């Protein structure tokens, strides 16, 4: 589904910023920082509009935010266009290259919460060295 179709399916207007952000994240194989997205957007980037756009895309479950150690924030396109609880998945953070990769095919543990607690989201972050960096060290 292209950016315009995706926005339309969520009932959102197709603004240049929204289309650009979705297109950039669709082409990326890893999660991107604001700086990465800014570089790709070039002159179309405006910080305030960017944050409004990101919040709208987050609220519509088109993208998700990954925060690493409260210092690095990255964004990725949701590949599963289903309710938020069904989109829970693990992320892998490479300590060497700082890439964040969504791992969607890994079964997650279903945590049993105490009575009266309701789960909204679950974030799993695994830290280590990615395959690319492992292979680079061997060469």
Image (cartoon, grey):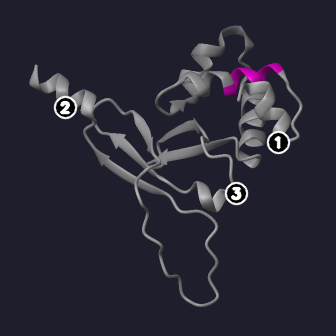
Mark 1 or 2 closer to N-term? 1
Q: Is residue 108 above or below residue 60?
A: below
Rendering quarter of residue 114: bottom right
| Magenta-drawn segment | 16-22
Lateral position of residue 131 relative to residue 111, left or right: left
What is the distance, in whole Å, between disc 1 and disc 2 at their CAs? Answer: 39 Å
Label 1 or label 2, whichever lies nearer to me, is 1
Mark 3 or 1 closer to N-term? 1
Crowd band around label 2 with a 10 angstrom C-alpha radius: few (<14), some (14–19), many (20+): few
Q: Count every numbered label the image shows and give the total.
A: 3
Q: Residue at x 53, y 82 (%)?
A: 113
Circle 3 — which element?
loop
Q: Which residue is mark 3?
A: 83
Q: Which residue is mark 2?
A: 134
Crowd band around label 3 with a 10 angstrom C-alpha radius: few (<14), some (14–19), many (20+): few
Rendering quarter of residue 20: top right
Q: Is residue 44 above or below residue 51?
A: above
Identify the residue at the far top of this view: 43
Label 2 or label 3, whichever lies nearer to me, is 3
Q: Main secondary structure of the magenta part?
A: helix
Q: Residue at x 18, y 22 (%)?
A: 136
Q: Residue at x 52, y 45 (%)?
A: 66
| Residue 120 percent across, percent down from the top left | 64, 67
Q: Which residue is mark 1?
A: 10
Circle 1 — which element?
loop
Rendering quarter of residue 34: top right
Crowd band around label 1 with a 10 angstrom C-alpha radius: few (<14), some (14–19), many (20+): few
Q: Is residue 89 above or below residue 113?
A: above
| Residue 46 percent across, percent down from the top left | 74, 20
Nearer to the camera, 24 or 43 = 24
Mark 2 or 3 closer to N-term? 3
């Amino acid at each position: 589904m292209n950016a315009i179709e995706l926005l339309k399916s969520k009932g959102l207007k197709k603004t240049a910023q929204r289309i650009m952000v979705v297109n950039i994240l669709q082409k990326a194989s890893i999660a991107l920082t604001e700086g990465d997205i800014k570089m790709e957007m070039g002159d179309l980037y405006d910080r305030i509009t960017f944050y409004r756009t990101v919040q709208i895309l987050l609220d519509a479950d088109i993208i998700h935010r990954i925060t690493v150690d409260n210092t690095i924030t990255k964004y990725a396109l949701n590949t599963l266009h289903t309710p938020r609880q069904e989109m829970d998945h693990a992320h892998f953070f490479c300590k060497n290259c700082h890439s964040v990769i969504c791992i969607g095919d890994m079964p997650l543990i279903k945590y049993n919460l105490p009575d009266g607690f309701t789960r909204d989201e679950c974030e799993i972050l695994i830290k280590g060295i990615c395959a690319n960096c492992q292979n680079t060290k061997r060469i």
